[in-house]
Amino acid sequence: MSGVCRGLLFFTSSLTFLTSIPILFLAILIHSNAGNSKCNSYFNGPVMMIGIILLVLSVMGMIGAGCGMTFMLWLYEWVLFLCIIVLLCFTILVGIGMNKSSYESDQEAETFQLSQFSEWLQRTFVDKDDWSHIRSCFTETRFCEEIDPGELTWNPSLHPVHFHMQAISCIQSCCVWFWQINEKGCCKPPPYCGYELKNGRWIVPESGLRSNEKDCTKWSDDPTIMCYDCDTCKAGYLARLKNNWRKLRAFFTCLIVFLVVNFVIGCCAFRGSR
C-alpha cells in the first residue's frame, strides 16, 4: 500500500512541478521586461511566489516519494498543511466579506458606492497602496480611449477588460490578466455630478455642476486620470469582483480539494516509510 501511495505522490508532484516551470518562467520574463511599469511589478510578486511554492512542494514530494526519505515527506506534509490552512482561511474571509456587502450581483445601477461593500473588502482590494498599482494598469492599457463615452451603459455581462503585461510581444499574446471593472464608474463622471457630453467630451455645463462631491471634482478628460481615483471606480471594481466570486470560489474549492488529496496521499506514503 505504501508503494502505491508513494507512486501516486510522485505522479501528482511531477504534475505540480511541470506546472510551476511555466509560471516561474513567466514571472522571470515579466520581471526582466517590467521596466518602470507599476502594473507589472504589482502582479509579478504573487506570480513568482506561487511558482516558487509549487516548485518547492513538488521537489519535496518527488524526493520524499522517490527516495523514501521520511524527513522530506514529513516536511512536505507540514508545508502542504500550512498552504491548505492559509488558502482555506483566505477563501472563508473573502466569502464573509462578500456576504456582508449590501450589493447584489444581479443589481443594475448607474454607479456603485463603496458603502455597499464591507470595510474588509475595501481594505483588502482597493486600499491606497493596492489601488495605486491597479490604477496604473488602467492608465498603461488606456482602455477608456477605446470606449465611446456616449455608449457607456451598465450591463452585468460586460466582457472582462484585458490588462496585457507590458512585456515582450510573446508574453502579451499568451498571458492576459483579466480585470473587470465598471466602465461607467471609471471612464465617465458619475451621472449625479451633472456633466454634459459634447463632441465626445464631458464638460461642465454653464449652470455648473449639480454636486460638489469629491468624485465630481476628481473627474478629468486626461486619459491618465479619467475617474480612476473616484470611489465609483473602486466600487465598480468590487462589484465585478463580487459578480465573479462564484467562479473564483469554485476554483479555490477545487484547489483546496486537490491539496487535501495530496496531503492524504502524503500521509499514507509517510506512514509507509517509517
Image (tube, grey):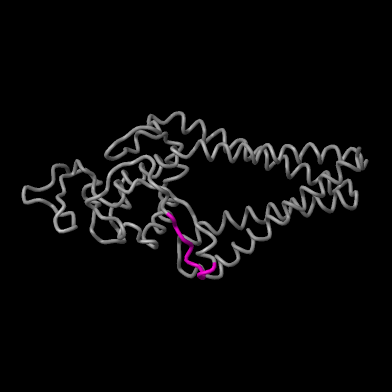
Left or right, 102 with respect to 168, comes to left
Quarter-of-image position of residue 202:
bottom left
**Residue 72: image x %, image y %?**
84, 49
Query: What is the residue that sits farthest to the left in this orientation?
Result: 206
Question: Which of the two residues, 107 or 189, is positioned nearer the viewer here?
Answer: 107
**Magenta residues (range):** 162-170
Is residue 134 left or right of 205 when viewed as pictured? Answer: right
User: Residue 216, percent across and down?
Assistant: 21, 47
Residue 223 horizontal side relative to residue 9, left or right: left
Q: Residue at 27% of width from left, 48% of height from top?
A: 152
Which residue is more in the foreground, 208 or 104? 104
Which picture quadrant has residue 47?
A: bottom right
Spot occupied by residue 103 in the image (x, y as percentages of width and height): 38, 32
Q: Is residue 178 magenta?
A: no
User: Residue 83 or 147: which is nearer the viewer?
Assistant: 147
Quadrant occupied by the C terminus:
top right
Give the residue drawn at x 44%, y 55%. 162
Q: How many marks?
A: 0
Image coordinates of residue 184 in percent, x first then y, are 29, 46
